Image (cartoon, grey):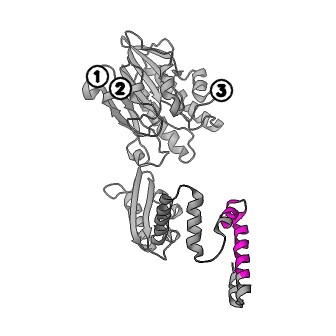
Amino acid sequence: MKIGIISDTHFGYKRFEDDSYAQGKEAILKAAAESDIILMAGDIFDERNPSLDTLQNVFKIFRELATIRQEGSCVTDVLLTPMAAIHGTHERRGKEEANPIQLLQTLGYLVNVHNRTAIFEAWGEKVAVSGMGGVPEDAAGKLLNALDCKPVEGAFNIFMFHQTVEELLPFGDVMSAEELPKGYGLYVCGHLHKSMHVPQYSLLIPGSTVITQLKKEEAGQKGYYIYDTKGTGEKKFEFRKIDSRPFAFQELNFSNATAEQARQRAAEEITRLSADKDGKPYAKKPIIKLVLSGTLASGHEKAGIGIRSADWDEALLFVDNNLTTEALMVKIDKIRELRGRHKNVKELCTEILKEHLGKTQINVDLLFNVLSEEGGAEAAMAYVQEYISNENANSGSPSATSAASQP
């Protein structure tokens, strides 16, 4: 039996809403044309409460899918549906609240296999699909052990889930692939947006069909998998590409550069990434994420670089400008050094205040307490100005008094 495997279509994703519909639709309809059943591993929708416009657009896709399946499918599964799905983290709602995947099941477009098993039959084969929808990361391991669904004897068993996996993306308290329930011939994971095959765990991750996170991991090709239960070796599954918008993630690091040098280099990279490897413009405007880091020379501010999304017609540009000046880096390093010598924030701040106030007799402890209170900046300024005025009065220095009155 041939199985289409899709995940993370994120229908209704606002930043690239048209892409979410076009690319998700292409994946679903093309997978349907060459497979007997379809699996969707969560985050079909981008929101737990999709708008009416989003629902209407998705219903149209599933109605078209139903027409294709009625004409070409030989599936005779006992649940009378060609698709099995689970909810993702974007669709998860309260225990007593219906989520969008349950709505699609009510309308007859799919069967929800969260903590249950659906059996599909075709070509004399049985495929049993079980699953666990997206749950809080720190609860995934415990909930996996509490599932009621089990492998079905005499069937090819698939387990579908929507979580971060520790072996692939170490990220706090997340589940391990070792915690997956035993007895399944294939595991399908949603949530991760980069497609991959992890053979040691019999794991397929189709990835997302649309760019959402603007991370380096999303720079690969978008698409879906076709899995053949009768296939062998490399022919057992194939990744099918869809016509997705190109995405490039580029990091640029600078050291003591001028604003003009940083601007010019960034502009050159944007121009290069706006075309294919042969220098030809893409059919669709590419998405470019540019991350600028490092230092600018003293006297140059990062605002002077002038790289803005609105200035580039060739691409959809997103810039993270993390540049700083050498002088600021020296200050940050000094604070880090001070922080290492002190047990608490008060000790650290007190030493910094003493350093900046020099040899004055200002009560630093009192000043710190004033700064710690609500509206403390104004009160602290008033305290310092009062101290300076008193000092000037005692020394008889009118020029100093005049200087103290300046903001």
Q: Is residue 62 above or below residue 311?
A: above
Give x and y (percent) for residue 323.
47, 65
Alpha-carbon span between mark 3 and mark 1: 41 Å
Within 10 Å of the Cα at label 2, are there few (<14), some (14-19), or many (20+) other Cα atoms? many
Residue 379, quarter of picture: bottom right
| Depth check, front residue: 51 or 395 | 395
Q: Tell me residue 74's x, y (percent).
A: 42, 16
Q: SS of the residue at dot 2?
A: strand
Give the residue type at disc 2. Tyr
Mark 3 sits on what residue?
Answer: 97
Residue range highlighted in magenta: 367-390
* Disc on res. 231: 1
Query: Can you identify the residue that label 2 sits on?
Result: 227
Relative to the observer, which residue lies in front, 360 or 400?
Answer: 360
Magenta-drawn stretch, dominant element (helix, strand or loop): helix
Q: Position of residue 93 (x, y in %)?
A: 62, 30
Q: Nearer the viewer, mark 3 or mark 1?
A: 3
